[in-house]
Structure formats: C-alpha cells, structure tokens
Amino acid sequence: MTMDYLTRPLTDLKGIGRARLATLEKAGLANVGDLLRRLPYRFEDRTSFRAIASLQAGEWATVRGTVAGVRTDYIRRGLSLTRVTLSDGGGSIQMRLWNQPYLAKTFVPGARFLIYGLVSDERGLHLSRPEWEPADDEGDPIHLGRVVPVHRGVGGLTPRVLRRLIFEALQGLPADLADPLPPELRGRDELPDLAWALRHGHFPDDVEEAERARRRLAFDELFIIQVGLALSRAGRAARSDGVRHRPEGPRLRAFLGALPYDLTAAQRRALDEIFGDMESPRQMSRLLQGDVGSGKTVVAAAALVKAAEGGFQAALLAPTEVLAEQHWRRLRELLGPADLAPAFLAGGTPRVERERLLSGLADGSVPVVVGTHALLEEDVRFARLGLVVVDEQHRFGVAQRASLREKGSHPDMLVMTATPIPRTLALTLYGDLDLTLIDELPPGRRQVVTRVVPLAQRERAYAWLHERVAGGGRAFIVCPLIEESEEKQAKAAARLHQELQVGWPDVPVGLLHGRLSTAAREEAMGAFRDGRLRALVATTVIEVGIDVPEATVMLIEGADRFGLAQLHQLRGRVGRGADQSYCLLVADPRTAEGQARLRAIASARDGFALAEEDLRLRGPGEFFGTRQHGLPDLHAADLVRDRGLLDLARSAAEAVVAADPSLARAEHGPLRAEVDRAFAGRPGAGTIG
C-alpha cells in the first residue's frame, strides 16, 4: 500500500502547466493530496433532464439537445455574441456565449450536447451562463448528468477547470491507498476508507454520500491535529529537564501579604496549579484564561515573584507598547513589597538606557523585565531565564513565542489571554497546553449597562456623554474598525478628535492610536489616568490591558464591524471601579448577523457565552483564521458543525498515543507519516513551539 500518489507533484496531472501550477501553489496547493483535500462547498443535482418546451425563465435546468444552428455576430470591436440553437425534437432554445467566437467550431450542426444553464427571457428565452458536455462521450460525465461538485475558484481558475483537474487526479488514485486511520478505529466509528472518501467527497452519487465522505475527511483533519498535540503533551510529560523553582519564600509571602484584597477562589486555584508546575522538574506550558477583569495580572505577578525568589529571571511579553507600559506600571506597584523593580524594554527605549538594561539582563542583575517585541531581538540575552509570561498570546506568532523561550534553558512558559475561547476551539488551538481557567470575577464588580444606539440617536448619545464628562466623569470613544490599515484607522480617530475638540471646548479630549510616538502615547494615557483628560478618542489599541477605574463610559462607533469577543474586550475597559458604568454601541447593522451580534453583547455579560455565540454566528475564523496558531489548516472540518466529531477525534488520538507514544508500530506507519506531513514546517505540534 502507498500514499505516495498523494504527494506527487501537480505537474503530473494532465492540464497543469507552469501558469496553472503557480496559481495553485499560491493558494497553498503543492501536490495531488492538497488538491483532493480541497472539497467542494456545494453540489448541484444535474441528473434530471428537462424537455426544452417546459423551460421557464428564472430556473436553472439541464437539457439534452442537438445543435440546429450556430451564428456569431460581432457587435463592436472587442465584443461578440455566439448564438447556438439547440433542439430536442419537442422544442428549441438558444444558448448565448459572449466573446467566445471560437466555440462555433465546437457546436457544429448535428452534434449532441448536455447543457446546464440559467433560463433567461431577456430579449427572448435563452440559456445563459451555460456549462456543457458532449452527449456521446464515452466514460463518466464530469460536468453534467450527475451530482456535480462546485469548488471555490482559485486565482483565475474557474470551478469548471478545478472540477476537471480534480477528476483527472481521481482517475489515478490507487485502489490500495494507505489509510492513516487504524482499521479498528474506522470500524468502530463507521468511517469509510480514505480512497472512497476522496472519490465520493468530490463526485458522489447523492448528497448523503457526499456528507459521509466529508465526515470521514473532517475526522482525519481533527484526528491528525489531536494526535500531533497528544504527542507534544506526551513528549513534554516524559522530560524532566525544566526549571525547578523553590517553594514559597519570604518574597512571595511579602507579595501576597501586601495585596489590599483577598484573592478569589479561582485565583487561588490558578496559583496552586501554576506553582505546582513551577516546582516540578517538568517544563511548564500552561494557558491562563480568564474573562475581562478576572485578575490574571495578579496571578502572573505572583509567578514572576516566585521565579525571581529562586534566583531566576522572568520576562513578560506584551503585544503593544501601550499594554506593556500598563503592565510595567502595575507590576512596579505589585512587586514593590517583594523588593523587586521590573525593568521596561520597548522599541522606543533610549539607546543608553537600552544598553544598560541589556547588560543587566546578560549578567543577571535585572530579575524581571516587561517588554514588547523588543525582547525578541537577537542582542537580548539572559543569564538565567526561568519563566516567560506572554500576554494576549494570540497576537504573537508561534516562532515569536518560541524565540523568547529559547533565550533560556527550558524555562517555564505561562501564556495568558482575556479573549474567551469556546471549549471546542480550546481543545484544538491549545490542546498541547495545560489549561487554567479563572472563572470568577472579584466581588463588588458591577455589571456594565450596555445599550445599542441607532445612528439616528447618535447626537443624543454624544450630548449625554458630554454632560457626564463635563461633570467630572471619564470616557473612552473608540473609532470604527477599518480593515484596510492601521493608518486609516488612526486618521479616522484624528478626525473625530478634532470634531470633539471644537464641539466640546469645555472638556479636555485626548487622542490615542498606534501610530503615535511612544512619548505621545504615554502622555495621553497618563493625562487620562490622572484626570487631566476627560475623554479619550482611541483606536482598538486600548482593547486589552488598560486599567483606569475612573472611566465609566465606553462609546464604540461602528460597533457592528466588530466581533463579539472584541466588543466584550473593549467594554471591559470600563466597570473597573465602584461607580455604575455604561457601554454605548453606535451602529445601524444592515445584516441579520450584525443585528444578532449587537443583541447578544447588549444582553449577555459572560465572555465565554459570548464567544460561543460568536463562534455560532461567524464561525471559527475570528480565532482560527490566522496562521498564528501553528496548526494545520482545516478544509473539510467545521468546528461549529463538527463539535461531536472533535470529541471523538480527541479521545481516539489520546488512546492511540497512550498505547504507542512514538507511533512506532507498523500499523501506525501511515499515521506517523501523515502527522509529519501535516505539521511539517510548523514550530512544534501546537501553539507555543
């Protein structure tokens, strides 16, 4: 048996030359297997043939006809129309072809064709947008007379071209194609073999057969990912070369004793899990997940103190200078009682200060550092790095996180996110990590009153907002999300800032966006924090980590452009103090999905419930759409529809890896090869390398 056929180059297929190869490779299709795993997104039943006399305008129909005549008219330069008259004995109809005069040689009088097209009555009944196939061809039909796959176009390649290429690829598919799924697994879950699924996933006899094939290929994708993650977990569990931190000492006791509040039960449970990892010889790889305001920073700060107490260095990596600077300020307060002064390193750090800091990291005299991507640069070296904390980890690529970890000798890693992730996705995206969940908010937090404001009431909302900030309150005003570029979003924020400066002469209004200099950003945040600014116009740079308890209003322009998770994050910038807070969502959504998102954010407070709703409404693209996760892409599987299949795949993968931790058995050879293929070129079998 062999899987070699699936790894053959696309140029082995008839109809793929240099230009088509470049188009397919640009779409990520490198070999025959990649092409065959790209399933159609829908099917059309073209098995029922209609009498031409019965056709009605507006319907799609399949007919058999004999060419009764053909004529090409050149309407003007560069525009031609070829009319093909088809007859089935009981009636006739024209097929119209624009700018394809060469087809007159194909549709010769007397030739018989199968035709599928849209029946149109514009200037006479005719077939438009047709597909055809000679009626007398031997062998299986491809485009007509069957349930026909419709694939998404790739570059300039039409669905018809892709259908032909995939049909050609399936003709050479070996009957003895090796199957990566062990036979007992296929039998237990009633999954067809791989060759059958590849054939019938594209050219089924009916839609039920197509779904059975898709389910098998979807299971493959999820199972291969889960096997890779299970191998990663097993490999990590078998190693004992991680950093072993000391038990609780005087610095940690001083840190915990100086906190002006009691930790929640969820925070204490999180510390027990993290400290257990840190004190063991096994390298920690843990995801700390908690809703907005749940107290992750204090938990991470305790881990930083524990690392420093044993003589190790600790680094906290944040995705933006605004967030990194916020962490640095907060940690200076928190770590003071433990006699620790965290350093700060960002792209804007002055050269002399940077050189002094780099020297301190290299000789070990700087125990804790907070920074941005600047920490990843080659000249940043640590004497004894024992802990890496990554905040908002989904904003970093796999290689970036791994590069910081590699600056030490197997340091522990704690990755944090305030983005609620549905369990379905967490099992896939973070299946190689141990998960710690802070599922409890500190006592006394008041719910943020959330209202959707139609555009017709926008001026009224701003008048209410002006009254609040003029009376001493503080408010964030977030500009609409502009997909094209950060520069355009910054310009939109600058325009709104100017408008408010003119319209609110009695209120100091600030501006914050990612294209400002470090000094300007720090000045704006500092002025807003201490009350010199009452309103802050900002882009989504304030989405995470900003903690100004006096801010009680969040107004979001164009709220229907944001995902639920992002709206929830933005809303989390208010409601952090004792006063009642408000979130105003200015929008006029035109789609049912947009309306549903705003209804959900206005009525729900729990971030995980909102994340589940976002997954249902928008699919997994918000979480899974980038290549940051380091996992193989999904083509057949749908993480909304296939939740049950994911649970099956995970339990099956754990059983296989438990029985054969290195997949060394002969029957697991094809599985091992497929896992290697799927994760090739990706740092590690999971998310943090």
Image (cartoon, grey):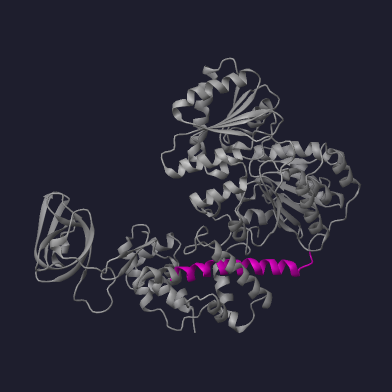
174 or 271: nearer the viewer = 271
Is residue 548 shown above or below 428? above
Position of residue 365 measured from the top left corner of the image (x, y, whole percent): 84, 46
State the residue at coordinates (54%, 70%).
Answer: 677
Magenta part, dominant SS: helix
Q: Quadrant of residue 92?
A: bottom left
Residue at the location (15% across, 71% down)? 112
Specify whether residue 457 is in view.
yes
Q: Is residue 595 above or below residue 308?
A: above
Q: Is residue 342 left or right of residue 610?
A: right
Most foreground residue, 341 or 436: 436
Furthest residue in direction top, as rendered = 506
Q: Is residue 8 visible?
A: no
Question: Is residue 319 highlighted in magenta?
Answer: no
Asked if 25 appears above or below 531 in the picture, the reply is below
**Region of the chain picked out in magenta, as a range:** 213-241
Q: Is residue 237 magenta?
A: yes
Residue 416 in the image, given as x and y percentages of width and height = 68, 49
Q: Horizontal and vertical percent for residue 87?
A: 10, 66
Question: Which quadrant would residue 284 be assigned to in this image?
Answer: bottom right
Q: The C terminus is located in which quarter?
A: bottom right
